[in-house]
Image (cartoon, rainbow, N blue to C red):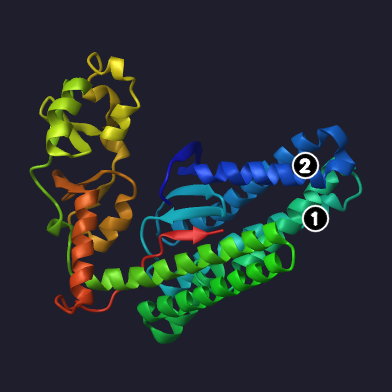
Amino acid sequence: MNGAAIPLGKIAGIRIRAHTSWLVALFLLTASLSVEFGRSTGRAAPAVAFVTALALFASVVAHELGHSLVARARGVGVSSITLFIFGGIARLESEPRRARDTIAIAIAGPLVSVAIGVAAFGLAGSGVLPATVGEPLAWLGRVNLGLAVFNLLPGLPLDGGQVLQGVLWAWSGDRDRATLGAARAGRAIGWTFIVLGGARAVLGSVFDGLWVGFIGWFLLSTARSYAESVRTRAAVAGASISDAMVARFPSVAATTSLDDYVRGIVASNGRRAHVVLRDGGIAGVVTLERVLQVPRHAWAATAVGDVARGVDAMPVLDARTTLFDALTSIGDAPFAFVTDGTSILGVVDRDHLAAVVGVRVELAASAALPAQGRSASRQTAAWT
């Protein structure tokens, strides 16, 4: 997802982050649960509600870890898990190579949610816990089981849609067709939620109706993006990262002051990111966004190297990477370094890469650039 993300740490080497929209969800859920738990917990209701909301999002992380760990076991890397207003998303670094891998990765998350739900219900019904603990546990159990059922609806981007995609792929042998079929199912589910949400709003449950409709809109737009990714990858099939790589990359010395960098370089060439050089080697990347985080009065005394992101924080792509895989792998990074396995050959600018892909998609749509063979939609995310 685009937007600011708050780092929360790592689990099993996977970065856990929270999108800023997650804070809205945390606030709304805490407020709602404070009312729901008010009778059994009294004055402690806000605190119990907050802890319960955090427990729910912890179970969302566990759900995404289910996807992620199975993906790793199947040879698919996982770069991060991000919480957001609708749940969570695990960003996969590549697509599963086989239909059965797609199915296994997709089904792992709902199985984790079912396990959490059953365990929470078991503890809540044990009779040994006070109501202040039992009621939140019962709620947590219901919600996790409900999330498992919701996620298994057969349409992208839901886990059930990933399962459907894998089944159609195994049946037809064509991953493109499978992705488009699962995306069509996802659009149908999205429209169903929008209609149901509108009906609930008309009948008097305005907030619930708007929320259901908003979920439907989200499902609809994301399902469309899956279908669009198939067309995009078909348009850039056969093109490699070398088509967008530059060996003479925009650079700046690490010792340059922020004042000189902004006034003498950024303002003149309009670039928002530059590779930082130190002692003849690449030390990292500096962006205008990072510079603007430094108080203006400190620019003259602060060097570019002091605010640059290190090389280890930037994506490194093999020179044989396709344009589509490069676009999805670069994420929010301003640059990706291109290597032949032993040395850096050049860099890929995210904005330039997106422009190259966009032009090829436009040419393919006008039949000026024939698609070079069939291609597959890359599964970059597992949705909660």
Question: Which residue is found at the position 26% from the left and 36% from the top?
Answer: 311
Question: Which residue is found at the position 23% from the left and 72% from the top?
Answer: 235
Question: Which residue is found at the position 82% from the left and 54% from the top?
Answer: 122
Position of the C terminus by quadrant? bottom right
- The residue pinned by badge 2 equals 34
Q: Secondary structure at mark 2?
A: helix
Q: On screen, 148 above or below 35? A: below
Location of residue 211 by image quarter: bottom right
- The residue pinned by badge 1 equals 121
Under mark 1, the amino acid is Phe
In the rendered view, does 149 fall on the left or right side of 264?
right
Residue 237 appearing in the image: no
Q: On screen, 101 above or below 90? A: below
Q: CA distance from mark 2 to mark 1?
A: 20 Å
Q: Secondary structure at mark 1?
A: helix
Question: Which residue is found at the position 53% from the left and 46% from the top?
Answer: 21
The picture places residue 132, in percent across and down from the top left corner, at 85, 40
- Which residue is farthest left? 248
